[in-house]
Image (cartoon, grey):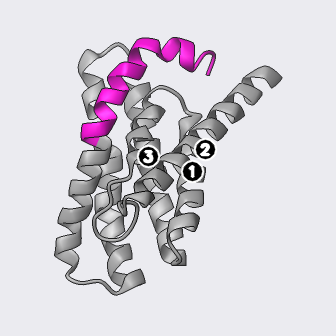
Amino acid sequence: MKNKKSLFLTQAAMIAALYVVLTELSNIFGLASFAVQIRFSEALTILPFFTPAAIPGLFAGCIISNLLVSANIFDIIFGSLATLLGALFTYLIGKFSKGKKTAAWFAPISPILANTLIVPFVLKYAYGLEPLWLFFITVFAGEFISCGILGLPLLFIVKKYAKNIFYNT
């Protein structure tokens, strides 16, 4: 039992660290914050499809990343909660669709929706940016690129090796 907990925590920590590194890489290119966000780290939001360890890993990674790239406490809290909600629903998609070949295509939908429905309000109320309707479009576009265009190929690559990568979770 101890081994399983250690493995879970190790995987969560590795995912968190990878999320932070990839967000910092996005930040170097000016893509990690504000109205248009294309965080390379958001591609990792497909990982809960394979392992529940990705849920706390993504959440912790997002909190740390938001602390590093944004000064606003509401962005740190609600942006991270959006990632947490997306991760939880991605996990549920993976858990309840075992063996269904088409299920993988649905994995990026929950993080895209969670961020699209939450982050525009953060931009408006935390940063005073306007117009709100525009941020639904820009956040959706950024998440679609990050989770859909970058995340789906990652999902299919990881899917081939998931039993070896996420052994015993």
CB atoms of marks 2 and 1 within 8 Å: yes
Q: CA distance from mark 2 to mark 1?
A: 6 Å
For the residue marked with disc 2, what is the amino acid?
Ala
Most common secondary structure along the magenta stretch? helix
For the residue marked with disc 3, what is the amino acid?
Ser
Vertical order, 12 against 71 (above or below): above
Secondary element type, mark 2: helix
Q: Residue furthest right?
A: 2
Residue drawn at (46%, 13%), measured in percent from left and top? Answer: 161
Judge whether residue 1 can be spotted in this image: no
Q: Residues within 10 Å of mark 2 (few under 14, many from 20)?
A: some
Judge whether residue 130 can be spotted in this image: yes
Residue 25: percent from left, percent from top: 46, 51
Q: Which residues are magenta?
A: 148-169
**155 within the magenta span:** yes
CB atoms of marks 3 and 1 within 8 Å: yes
Image quarter of the N terminus: top right
Q: CA distance from mark 2 to mark 3?
A: 10 Å
Mark carried by residue 17: 2
Between residues 69 and 135, which one lies in front from this camera angle?
A: 69
Which label's residue is closer to the chain start, 2 or 3? 2
For the residue marked with disc 1, what is the amino acid?
Gly
Which label's residue is closer to the chain start, 3 or 1? 3
Q: Would you name the residue on which mark 3 appears?
A: 41
